[in-house]
Each structure stands twice: as C-alpha cells, then as structure tokens.
C-alpha cells in the first residue's frame, strides 16, 4: 500500500506516512478474519501479557500514558486503578457507541480489525481482574456487529476467549451487545444504564464513577474501542516503544477523521502532539488543503461538542492539553472543516439541532433549553428573527452552561481564550455542548446572524425599508 | 404482529443467558422483535416483559428512548439520510430534499407501496464520505442525486444496489429490522459462568494466584 | 460552632450562607440545610426516595476547596469544610434559569388546576419567577388529563418530569406500571396501553406530584387549598394507624394526606386508607335513630322495616330490651372501628353495667386476645431494623396493612432485612422474601416445630431443604414475627398454637400483630374481648371506678353465634360491625341472627346485618367526626381529630353508651371526654398517668403503650380442636385489599375495585385434574358450593385451592364451617 492511497475496502481510511499502531492491518482486504489476524502477529501481545503478572500489564499501560480515545482523554492505566480493592466482580464495558458528529474511527476499527479489539479486551480483563466484558456497538453499525459476532465466534472456537484461556488460568466472557440509536449512550454512565436494559440516561458522577459503582452497581471499566485497540501493540512492544511515538504528554498515535470542505477528507492515523491541525488540513500526505478557490473559515477541532477554531489556530498541535488551553478540545478526534462558503447560522443551527434531538430529557436545562436554542436559531434562519434574539439565545445558553463559555482567542477583537471545559447546570456535558457552536459562531460571525435578523425585521415592517431607502437617496 | 415465534423465543433465551441480569438483554431482544415483524408491537413488548421479568411499561420506557425502534409499521427499506454537519457541508440537506422528491414522501413518511421509509437522521459515522445514507443500516457513500436514484431503482427491482456496502460482497440487503447477518453463539461449555453479581464474592482466580506469587 | 472546635465523631462542619452548621455524616446537603432553616427549592428531590438530580432546581454554589461551582444539593453528601451559597448571584441565576425552563412548556391553567394554591412550581414562580415569558413559540401539547388508573388522572402538559411518581411506583410500591416514555423534549410519563397504574398505592403519587399533573378522582375540582381547614390525625382503616392530615371544606372531609412519620408510615398511605373517607360523606349515612315500624313510619315492634325515631324513644326501647336480661343471654359484637374512648365506654357498659363478658371485637377472623396480648410486642421500627430477620406468619400485609407492607418491602429491598414467609399461599411479600413456605392447611404447627428442630425432612408440604435453609435464617438474634390470621378456612387455633410455640422456643423474638380492622388493638386493650378488662388485664380485679365486672370468662364471637343459633341470646348489640358479611361461616351467622330476640346496632351506615336490627343508633364517624385516640398494632397511641360535625343527630359511640347506661339507671361516670379519660386512666394500668394532652403534644413521636398482665399460655395449653380434614382439596381463603366491606361499598372511587374471586390452583394440580385455566369450575363440599373461574397459580401449594373472601361475584363463605380445622372441597368443571 502506498502512502496517501485510499484504501478501497476501508472507505474513508487514507494511508499516510509513519508508524501505524491500530490501522496496521487495514491494507489487507481480509483483515477482519482470524486467519489474517494470526498471520500478522495477532494475539501475540495477549500471549506476551499472559507471561507477565496482571500487575505488570497494568503498569505497562500506566507507564505508557495510554490516553482514552473517547473524548475526555483520561489515562486508561489510571482509570483502571480506580476500582476499589476487594469488590468483585468487576466488568469491562467497551464503548463502541461512536456517534459524535464528525467522528468515525471506532467503526473502522470494529469493521476492519475486530480481533485486535477483542485482544485488547482480553489484555484489559487480565490486567485488572475483569471477569466479563460487554462489547457495546452502536445500533446503526450493522456491519461492525456482524464482523464482531463472527470474530467472537472464531475467537471462542480458537480458545482465545472463554475458560482457562491457553491454559493460563485466565477466564473471561466477551459478549457482543448493541444499541438502538441514542447519542447520549456514548456517555459512560448512560452506556451502563443502556446495558442494563434501561433508558440511556446518565447517572450523576461523582461521587460514583463507574470504576467504583458501575454495571449492576459493581466496579466497571468503560474504555473506548480505539483505546483498547492500542493494547495488543503496547503489550508486544512495551511502554518505552509506545512513548517514542507522539509527544511526552500525549504519546502514541491517534486516528483523526477530517471531513468537510477539504480536498481529500479521510481518516488518518498520525502521531499525537507532534502533528498539527495545519499538517492534517494542508499536508500533501493528508487532506491536501482547501478546495479550489476556497479559504478556511472555521473548523470544529474535536467533534461537534468542541468550540470552533479559526484560521489563526491551525498551528496548534493535535494534543489534548494545548487544545484545551486554547479554549476547545481535541475530543473524539473529529475535525470538520468549513470554508468561506459556509453559512455560519445554518451550520450552528445544525449542530444545535443535533443536541436538541439527542437530549435524553433528564435534566431540565438540557431538555428544555436545547430545544429552545434550536427554535430561536431556526426562526433566525427562516427569516423570523427578532431584535433581542441573540441576547436571548446567549442567556438561554448561559442557563445551560453558566459563566464564560470556553472559546478560542480572537486577536483581531482583542479577546482572550476561555479554557475548556465549560461549566454546567446539568448532569452530563450534552446540554452544555449545544452552547459550543452558539458562542463560537456568534463571537466570530455575529454580523451574519444580525443580517438575517435585520432582513426579517425589514420584511415584517416595510416602512423601515422605505426609511432606509430614503436615507440612501438623501445620501446620494 | 405479535409475540415472538417459538424459534425466536429460543433465540431470546440464548441471548438472555449472555447477561448476569435478564433485563440487560432487552435492547437486543427489541431488535429481535423488530427483525421478526419489521417494527415493535405492543404484543411483542408485553412478551419481552414476560421473558425478562419486568413490566410492559418498563419495556416501553426503554423501547421508546431509542431512535431505531419503530412503534408503527415502516417500509421494507429504511432510508436514513444524514444531514449532520459534515454531510450538510457537502450537500446532505439537498440530498434529503432530492430523496423526498424521488420517493414522494417527506422525511418520516413511508411510500404507498410500503417499500421505503425516509428519515432525516443524525451523524451515521461516515463523515469523510459525505453525503452519506444508510439503507437498513448499510452504507451508501459520497452519493450524487443520480446515485441515490440508482439505489432506489435497484431496490425496487429487487436487486442489491452496487453502491451500498455490505459486510461481504454480494450479500443481500435484508428487510428492515435485521442488523448484522451474524450472531454471537455461545454454548454452555464455552462460557465461563455468567451469573448474577451477588453470587460472586471473590477475586478471579488468576489475580489471586498472581498476588500469591508476588 | 467555631472553626477551631473539633469535629465530633458524627458531625460534619459546613458553612451555609455564612453560618457554620454541623451536619450529620453522610447527610445530603439539601437535608442538612433544611434542618438548619435554609430551604433550598426542589421539585424532584423527595426525602423518602433515592435522589436523581433531574430537575436541577436545587443547584447551589458549593466550594469544597477547589473553587466554587454549581452542584445539585440533593445529590451532594456534606463534606467537612464545605462552603455553600444558596443566595448568591450565581445560585439565583441558575435557579431562575431552571424555573424559566420548567415554565416554557407548562400550561398557564393554574386557575383551573387542583394544585393551584399549593403548587411548589406556582409558589416558586410567584416568589422568584420572571414577570413575562421570553418563550414565544407554541408550547408542548398532549391530550388533556387521561385516567391512568381508577383513581388517578394524568395531565402530561403540566408534568415537569421530576420522576417522583415513576420512582415511587418502582422504588417504593414495587409496581413500575408508569414509566417515562420517548426522549428529550418529547419525554412523557405514561402507562403501557391497556395496563393501568393499578397499584394499591397509586394515590401517593398524587400527593408527591410537585405540580398538578397527577390528580385524584375523589378530589378533582372539589376545593381550593385556601378553602380547606385541616387537623393532624390517624388513619383508622387498618391497624397500622398511619399518620395523616384530614382536610375538609364546608363541613365535608375532602382529602387525607399522608404525614411523614418516621415511626409509622413515612408519609405513605394505601389507596384504601387514603380514599375510603368517601363513605362518611355518603348520602346513606344514618342521621337519626331507627326503630322497627310499619310502612307509614310509625314505630311498631313487629314492623317489617326501619323507621325514624327520636333519641329518647330509641334509648328507652333499647333499655327496656336489655333491662333484667340474664348477662349470659346478652352478646356484644364488634367495636374495633371505634376510638379507644368509645371502646372503653362500651366495655364498661357491657362488663360493668350489663355484667356480661360475652363481648368480642374480633369477628371470628382474628386471633385469641389472650395470646395477642401475651406475646412480647415489637414496633415497626424493630421489625424493619437493618439486618434483621422477619418471620411473617399467616398474614399478607400488602392486602390488609398497606403502609406496613411498604415498610417491610423497603427493609427487604434496602436494609438487608431477611423476610421468611410462612403463609397459606404466596403473598404480596413473596417476591421480597428470602424464604417462601406455604404449609398445607392445618400443618402450620408441624412446620413451625420442624423449623425449630432444624429438621431436613419434608413436613406439612414443605420440602426439607427449604425448611432447613429457612431454619438457618430464623437463627437470628434480631428476630421479629409479623402475624395475623391467615386463611379464613382454617381454624385460628392453628396459628395461635404456632405462635405460642415460637414464643416458647425463641424468647428473644418479639411479635407485631397485624390483625384485621382499624382500632382492633385499642379494642383488645380496652377489654372488648372475653376474659379481659381494660389495660391488658385479665378478669379478676375489678377496677375501682367500676361497679362490677363479670366473674368468669364469656364467649367469643363464634361461641356467641352458636349460642344465639340455639336460641340462647336475647339481645345482641352490634358495635359498627357486620357479622353476616365478615364472619367466615355465613351459615352459622345467619342462623344466629335469625334467633336473636332483640338486635341493637350502633353504626354510621346500615349494613347487611344491621338492616335486620330492631334498634339502630346513628354514630359519628370515629375517624373524622369525633375526637379520640387510636392504638395501632405496635400499641402506639395517637390522636384522631374531629374535623367535621356528624350528620343529623349522630353522636360519638361513647356518648351513646353513656346515655344508654343512664337510661338503664346507671351513671358510667363521665359526661365528657376529659372525665372519660380520667376514668379510663384510673381503670387501665396501661393508660395510667397518660393524658390526652400528652398524646397530642407528642406529635409524630406518639408513645407506645408497653407491658401486659396477660400470661402467654404454654403451647400444651393451646389445643387445636375441630373436625379432621376430609378428602379432596383443602381450601385457603384470604382477604384482598378491595372487597365488599361496608366502607368500600360506600366509597364511590373504590367500590368497583373488588376484582372478584377466582379459584387459584397449582398448575400441576390443574393438569392432573384436566381442568383448563380460565374455565368455570364449581367448588363444593357437604355445606355448599360456589362457581368461579379457575386460574393457574404456582403460588398456591399443591393440594390446595385459594379463593378470595367477600368478593362481589361469589361468596366462598358458603363453603366454610367454623367448627372445622380445615375445609375440604371438590373441584369440577362447571359446564
């Protein structure tokens, strides 16, 4: 496979230079079969893990600073350590409910390399004594479900999963579970509710993080698909090799999905921290820049929940900490590029509408507030805006996420960045996320909103328009 | 439109056995009911309530939370057109409008022949390949309006559209309700011992052994 | 408390709005603040349910050392050094924001809403809400109120989705029949189609709804809160004595509200307790005395109907009927529905003036008063104490003692209390019990002996392993027994002997009597039972204020009825009771009352038995129309309020006793309640030193009357007598919450809820008998027969058939004979 090629059997994935940890098998058309997996070093990391003590495996993960790839970026090794001692059983729940707009990488990993994920699950379960694992795949991902079902059947038959695996005394069950369409279930406490057969409504945490009180009230580790998919490579090559990739605080590689108005959108696995947004957006090995005749207007740097960044921010490295300090988040690795043809109001409404549709309805501010935001934006877009709507919109937003909302610096206006994360009057960040596009777009493109409202006011009150015309005549 | 068939009850029991608590199987079981009938009827919900030992009201509470479960009959093919941000930037909303014209129904509607239900959906995780759709959860990527019409025409003709991606080449597009064409099957000999958490009090044996060695 | 003061072991030092307070360890901030006078507004939080943090109204600014932030005070346990601002600008902005969000889709129909005037949402809005709405769009619409059960309506437009009703249904009642449906902005509460919220406890959801989304059929559009007056009182429906507030308007009781008493009902009521006051408002209430008379309304001894009469005339007639009658030929039935005071007055009239000991407040469906009063008593709190073991004998509290059931259920679900069930069939507690045993009729004593001996053999239809594992659970040093009469088809001596056997073998165990009828425990304490004097004392030492007392033990209800049937009773007095309906052996009761010369009834409403009376005195409803006190199953004594005046010339039961005594030429010694209480306190060692004021001043900490001078007989002295069982199936007859009782019949909202009787049979037996579930069967024996639908029920032991008592469609009493230990029946298809 040549660098920069589309991979036809993995639509969306684009190969690029550099070490590949989780997408290393994407070049094979049959990468999802056990035969191919084993022929390409599969289950070796797990076998190596079995030669170590569980504690040693946990230490390697901790030492490697393997950051969670779901969005929050919390180190997996430290999360594992939050399980209270002597409370049994403990469970592993794999978060494969990838639904953040702009994001897809877990789907590719599940479709293209399910055994790598299964192997990652085995390693995690072995390391911290998890006796059952539930692999929760998003409901709409039928192909991923099919591939994982096949892979699990193969893995059980081959003795990689089940009782006394390879005679090691280690036993675990991995169960394929699937959702039914609810973005909020990607939130880990909602994921657990859903796995218990309930409505996927988040539970309040703290004081109860899932690692302490999770599935069935038992200690539960919830890890993202990409996070776990790193483990086989990590066990095989060790923490030091892992840390040679990426930056000090964000070692290793990460998958980024770059979509929107670029020449070559795609999913790329790159080293974290050392690669920048600019590299991805403009690099010849990556997206190859904006489309002909277009310029960058704004971009979503880490999923729909992330406040937007603007052309002056492209030099930021793909690393959680600096991006957070800049007022947004690296999040789920989803980068959405908007060029100068983009209608900021329309784009803002579309993201807000998403959160309004996906609100679980539990917390009042989110249930009522996100829909209200959508209604205000819709009427501005539809030409029914009213004077004062923008202030109302910002105040409604403030009642969901009070105080200064995270936003990037805007030197042209002399405005400083407000660092991530936002404050919230809700249990989970869904409601506050709806504020991200509003504050981002209004701060930078307020005139677009105002113009729509002004047109609407003129349409409702033609006398104003005559006044404007006559003023124009006088001036002329 | 009814309770689960005997074969599906057997399957349901197998699925329930995968979980330490029966109610955990509820979402996969609702999919099973939808696979059987194309939608989820009250009778099916009441039957599932019996199978997992909860009230029908609790089953309905769960069922209605999730977008994919349909409480009324829908088309053989569920056409989900994504209009979320990445698709919007690349013509997703225009594709939806085109789809409405082609099918002659508004988003949410079902064609008179009962073949297609059209939906305006949130992100379906193929953002770089915008605009994209799913037909019964099989992807169509980077679709032009003509591509969309070709897909509809092929489905009407009973063919598998070549612009839809399936797990294996040449696989048919199953009717609405069927997701992956494979299921995980576990025999009793294969599973470790899936039991309620109350019945487990001790650290797993490999941890206990290793800490002794330490 | 100052910052330098050391933290006590249980105290947590926090600062709320600049004031240092000491909270309890583990306490939620919202509760700690409230205990110290700072009320944080809330809609979803309820202290008796798990917090969910949904409404977000209780957000306050909290600093735990990492800078201030908004936190829901209902989900936040206090921690040392926590600083809380409940009035800061940030807090106010957040709370105002939540309030506005709740209002944007809330209809503005307060003027026609039952909750108007007592609505937390309305109150908050008036106090802090925005003057006008910034929401210009169309509000959410739902079909206006839909009935979700026979007593509760749901208006989803008003609902603010606080999860209180749905949490109550699942967490407290265990009936998750209402649930959130749909998602996000479309979320609604609803039932499953054709499966209503038919919970015995549904009315509680109306009380805890923070808006007018849930309304109760009996109260809808009846009154506004500002029209209501109210008094603290005690529910008299069953022996739990749930604490309530009685509310009335224009001399009509309109509503009972549960009061959160820690000791008793935690604020909850069964629907029967909550709504059966409707009977007191019935048009059928007795408003004046009645006598036998002719069709022109003129009194006449051989008249075939009841006609109005004056009080003097009725009293005169009653006195003349009683005058000079041999005490052995007088029988007094009932009294368990009256207040303690009235029970005392009637006990004194019967035993001291009429000199008869043929007095029984229980109607053959209870247990020997000497055993009940002789057993060491437990409190509800002791029974429900965390980690204990509760043996439930006979009774099904869910059917007969609703708010006790909720306490037991809570203990089993949350406090690690082990319930061991030893009942004639499965009960409402079965799914919460760790051990379920349903002994064959008549075999209870053998099963108890086996449990005590720790046998591993099968006994009385219970298999050995079940017995030995239950026996293990009973080896708890924290053992209590909740008991009551079980099957009405089994002689009460079976349970009595079992209880005495348990008490004898397990001296550390304490017992909670769950007997039938409201103030039954007060009645026993006042001596309304053969062989007893007031104060749990045996006949013998006549109280100083009493002229006389019977020398020997009189008859119980069954014995009185037998003597009456044989023509041995001249005058029978019914104190608010209906033996023809309630006495299990219908045939015997009918024979008895056909042979009584004079029948006198004191009651609020005519019933099946009193319709045949010669003299009827109209009584004030003891629950709402007469001041008094109530003694619950623990022995806890609490006030009953006089909230409205009785209809017509109806008067309190005790007053009727005093007037009848006067007519007989005797002074009972009291003309008002103070004098009565003084007389009672001098006669009853149990009540000595206690005053009415003590009882009302105790508030919710009502005192428990402890101690008893009744000695528990040894097991050998409790015989099981009666005929041996015949062939065929053994009948089990149990009570349901809803039946054809007088109160329910006259309560329009509850009258239709009696579901009807069916014959419940073990599925294996049905298969053996080749009878299909759902078909009609006839149960018959040498006494009678009834035809019923048959249902398959694995909760019924093989070899038995379970039927509900006193239901509209069939009278299973037709099959019962009070003289038998157990009742055998045949079953056959009724085709």
Image: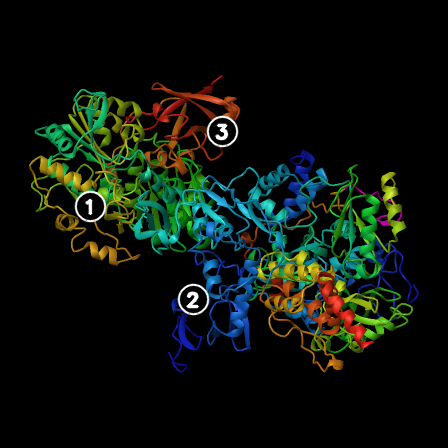
Q: How is the image coloured?
A: rainbow
- How would you rate the neighbour count of disc 3 (Cα within 10 Å): few for under 14, some for 14-19, many for 20 or more? many
Q: Is residue C326 left or right of residue C637?
A: left
Q: Quadrant of residue C341?
A: top left
Which mark is first along the chain, 3 or 2? 2
Which mark is first along the chain, 3 or 1? 1
Answer whether residue A185 is visible to the viewer in this image.
Answer: no
Chain of residue at mark 1: C
Magenta residue check for B171: yes
Q: Quadrant of the C terminus of chain A?
A: bottom right
> Which span is picked out in magenta?
B162-175
Residue C451 placed where, x, y %? 37, 42
Same-subunit check for callouts 2 and 3: yes
Residue appearing at x 79%, y 61% in the figure? B86
Q: Quadrant of residue B32?
A: top right
Dot in front, 2 or 1: 2
Task: Find out whether the residues at labels 1 and 3 contact each other: C-beta distance under 8 Å.
Answer: no
Answer whether residue C158 is visible to the viewer in this image.
Answer: yes
What's the mark number on residue C39?
Answer: 2
């Amino acid at each position: 496979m040549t660098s920069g090629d589309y991979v036809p059997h993995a639509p969306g994935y684009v190969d690029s230079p550099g070490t590949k940890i989780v997408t290393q098998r994407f070049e094979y058309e049959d990468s999802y079969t056990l035969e191919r997996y084993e022929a390409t070093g599969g289950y070796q990391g797990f076998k190596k893990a079995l030669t170590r003590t569980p504690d040693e495996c946990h230490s390697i993960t901790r030492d490697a600073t393997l950051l969670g790839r779901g969005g929050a970026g919390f180190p997996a090794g430290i999360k594992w350590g939050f399980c209270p001692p002597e409370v049994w059983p403990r469970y592993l729940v794999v978060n494969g409910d990838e639904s953040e707009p702009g994001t897809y990488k877990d789907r590719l990993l599940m479709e293209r390399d399910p055994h790598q994920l299964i192997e990652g699950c085995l390693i995690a379960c072995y390391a911290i004594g998890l006796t059952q694992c539930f692999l929760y795949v998003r409901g709409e991902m039928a192909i991923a479900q099919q591939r994982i079902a096949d892979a699990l059947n193969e893995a059980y038959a081959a003795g990689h999963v089940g009782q006394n695996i390879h005679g090691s005394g280690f036993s675990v069950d991995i169960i394929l579970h699937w959702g039914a369409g609810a973005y909020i279930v990607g939130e880990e406490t909602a994921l657990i509710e859903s796995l218990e057969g309930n409505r996927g409504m988040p539970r309040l945490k703290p004081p109860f993080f899932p690692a302490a009180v999770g599935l069935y009230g038992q200690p539960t580790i919830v890890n993202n698909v990409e996070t776990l998919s790193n483990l086989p490579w990590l066990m095989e090559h060790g923490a030091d090799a892992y840390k040679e990739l990426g930056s000090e605080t964000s070692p290793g590689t990460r998958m980024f999905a770059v979509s929107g108005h670029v020449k070559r959108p795609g999913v790329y696995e790159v080293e974290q921290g050392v690669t920048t947004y600019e590299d991805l957006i403009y690099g010849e090995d990556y997206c190859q820049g904006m489309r002909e005749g277009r310029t960058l207007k704004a971009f979503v740097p880490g999923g729909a929940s992330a406040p937007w960044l603007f052309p002056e921010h492209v030099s930021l490295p793909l690393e959680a900490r600096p991006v957070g300090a800049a007022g947004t988040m690296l999040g789920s690795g989803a980068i959405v590029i908007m060029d100068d043809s983009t209608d900021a109001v329309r784009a803002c409404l579309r993201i807000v509408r998403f959160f309004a549709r996906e609100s679980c309805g539990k917390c009042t501010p989110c249930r009522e507030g996100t829909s209200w935001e959508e209604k205000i934006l819709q009427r501005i877009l539809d030409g029914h805006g009213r004077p004062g709507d923008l202030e109302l919109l910002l105040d409604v937003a403030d009642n969901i996420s009070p105080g200064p909302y995270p936003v990037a610096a805007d030197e042209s206006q002399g405005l400083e960045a407000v660092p991530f994360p936002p404050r919230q009057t809700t249990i989970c960040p869904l409601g506050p996320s709806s504020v991200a596009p509003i504050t981002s777009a209004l701060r930078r493109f307020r005139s677009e909103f105002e113009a729509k409202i002004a047109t609407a006011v003129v349409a409702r009150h033609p006398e104003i328009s005559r006044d404007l015309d006559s003023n124009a005549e006088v001036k002329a | 439109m009814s309770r689960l068939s005997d074969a599906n009850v057997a399957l349901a029991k197998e699925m329930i056995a995968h979980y330490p608590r029966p109610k955990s199987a509820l979402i996969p079981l609702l999919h099973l009911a939808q696979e059987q009938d194309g939608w989820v009827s009250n009778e099916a919900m009441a039957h599932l309530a019996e199978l997992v030992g909860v009230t029908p009201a609790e089953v309905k509470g769960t069922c209605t939370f999730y977008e994919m479960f349909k409480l009324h009959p829908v088309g053989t093919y569920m056409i989900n057109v994504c209009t979320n941000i990445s698709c919007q930037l690349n013509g997703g909303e225009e594709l939806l409008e085109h789809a409405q014209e082609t099918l002659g129904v508004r988003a949410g509607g079902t064609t008179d022949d009962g073949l297609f239900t059209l939906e305006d959906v949130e992100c379906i995780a193929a953002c770089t390949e915008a605009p994209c759709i799913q037909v019964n959860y099989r992807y169509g990527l980077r679709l032009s309006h003509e591509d969309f019409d070709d897909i509809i025409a092929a489905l009407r003709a009973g063919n598998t559209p070549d612009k839809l991606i399936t797990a294996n080449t040449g696989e048919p597009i199953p009717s609405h309700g069927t997701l992956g064409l494979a299921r995980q099957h576990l025999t009793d000999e294969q599973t470790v011992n899936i039991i309620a958490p109350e019945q487990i009090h001790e650290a797993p044996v490999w941890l206990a052994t290793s800490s002794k060695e330490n | 408390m100052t910052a330098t003061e050391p933290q006590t072991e249980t105290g947590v030092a926090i600062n709320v709005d600049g004031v240092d307070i000491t909270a309890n360890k583990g306490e939620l901030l919202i509760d700690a603040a409230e205990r110290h006078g700072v009320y944080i507004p809330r809609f979803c939080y309820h202290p008796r349910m798990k917090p969910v943090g949904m409404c977000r109204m209780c957000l306050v600014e909290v600093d735990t050392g990492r800078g201030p932030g908004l936190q829901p005070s209902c989900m936040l346990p206090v921690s040392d050094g926590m600083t809380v601002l409940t009035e800061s600008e940030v807090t106010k902005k957040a709370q105002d924001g939540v309030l506005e969000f709740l209002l944007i889709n809330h209809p503005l129909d307060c003027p026609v809403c039952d909750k108007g005037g007592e609505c937390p949402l309305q109150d908050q809005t008036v106090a802090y809400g925005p003057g006008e709405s910034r929401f210009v769009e169309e509000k959410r619409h739902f079909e206006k109120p839909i009935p979700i059960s026979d007593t509760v309506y749901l208006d989803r437009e008003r609902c603010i989705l606080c999860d209180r009703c749905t949490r109550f249904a699942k967490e407290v009642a265990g009936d998750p029949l209402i649930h959130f449906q749909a998602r996000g902005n479309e979320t609604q509460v609803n039932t499953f189609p054709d499966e209503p919220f038919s919970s015995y406890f549904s009315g509680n959801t109306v009380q805890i709804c923070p808006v007018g989304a849930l309304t109760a059929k009996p109260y809808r559009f009846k009154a506004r809160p500002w029209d209501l007056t109210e008094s603290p009182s005690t529910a008299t429906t069953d022996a739990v004595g749930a604490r309530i507030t009685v509310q009335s308007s224009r001399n009509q009781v309109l509503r009972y509200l549960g009061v959160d008493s820690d000791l008793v009902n935690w604020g909850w009521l069964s629907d029967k307790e909550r709504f059966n006051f409707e009977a007191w408002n019935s048009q059928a209430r007795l408003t004046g005395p009645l006598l036998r008379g002719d069709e022109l309304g003129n009194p006449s001894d051989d008249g075939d109907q009841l006609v109005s009469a004056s009080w003097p005339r009725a009293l005169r007639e009653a006195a003349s009927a009683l005058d000079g009658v041999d005490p052995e030929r007088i029988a007094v039935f009932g009294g368990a529905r009256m207040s303690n005071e009235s029970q005392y007055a009637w006990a004194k009239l019967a035993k001291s003036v009429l000199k008869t000991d043929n007095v029984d407040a229980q109607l053959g469906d209870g247990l020997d008063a000497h055993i009940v009063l002789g057993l060491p008593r437990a409190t509800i709190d002791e029974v429900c104490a965390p980690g204990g073991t509760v043996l439930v004998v006979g009774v099904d509290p869910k059917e007969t003692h609703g708010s006790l059931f909720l306490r037991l259920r809570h203990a089993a679900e949350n406090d690690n209390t082990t319930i061991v069930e030893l009942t004639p069939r499965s009960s409402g507690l079965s799914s919460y019990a760790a051990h379920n045993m349903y002994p064959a009729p008549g075999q209870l004593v053998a099963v108890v002996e086996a449990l005590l001996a720790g046998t591993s053999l099968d006994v009385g239809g219970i298999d050995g392993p079940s017995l030995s594992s239950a026996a293990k659970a009973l080896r708890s040093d924290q053992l209590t027994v909740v008991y009551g009469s079980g099957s009405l088809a089994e002689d009460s001596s079976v349970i009595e002997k079992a209880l005495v056997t348990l008490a004898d073998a397990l001296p550390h165990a304490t017992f909670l009597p769950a007997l039938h009828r409201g103030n039954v425990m007060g009645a026993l304490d006042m001596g309304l039972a053969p062989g007893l004097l007031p104060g749990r004392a045996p006949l013998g030492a006549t109280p100083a204020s009493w002229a006389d007392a019977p020398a020997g033990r009189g008859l119980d209800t069954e014995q009185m009825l037998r003597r009456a049937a044989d023509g041995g009773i001249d005058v029978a007095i019914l104190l608010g009771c209906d033996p023809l309906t309630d006495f299990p052996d219908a045939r015997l009761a009918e024979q008895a009352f056909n042979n009584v010369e004079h029948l006198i009834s004191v009651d609020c409403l005519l019933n099946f038995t009193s319709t045949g009376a010669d003299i009827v005195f109209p009584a004030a409803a003891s629950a709402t129309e007469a001041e008094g006190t109530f003694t619950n199953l623990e022995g806890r004594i609490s006030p009953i309020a006089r909230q409205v005046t009785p209809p017509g010339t109806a008067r309190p039961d005790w007053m009727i006793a005093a007037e009848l005594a006067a007519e007989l030429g005797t002074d009972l010694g009291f003309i008002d309640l103070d004098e009565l209480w003084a007389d009672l306190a001098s006669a009853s060692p149990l009540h000595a030193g206690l005053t009415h004021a003590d009882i009302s001043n105790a508030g919710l900490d009502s005192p428990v009357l402890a101690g008893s001078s009744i000695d528990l007989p040894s097991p050998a002295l409790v015989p099981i007598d009666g005929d041996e069982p015949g062939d065929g199936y053994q009948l089990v007859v149990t009570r349901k919450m809803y039946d054809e009782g007088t109160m329910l019949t006259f309560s329009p909202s509850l009258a239709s809820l009696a579901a009807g009787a069916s014959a419940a049979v073990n599925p294996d037996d049905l298969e053996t008998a080749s009878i299909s579930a759902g078909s009609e069967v006839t149960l018959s024996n040498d006494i009678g027969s009834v035809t019923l639908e048959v249902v398959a029920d694995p909760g019924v032991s093989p070899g038995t058939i379970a039927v509900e008592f006193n239901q509209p469609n069939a009278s299973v009493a037709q099959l019962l004979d009070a003289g038998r230990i157990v009742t055998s029946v045949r079953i056959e298809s009724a085709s």
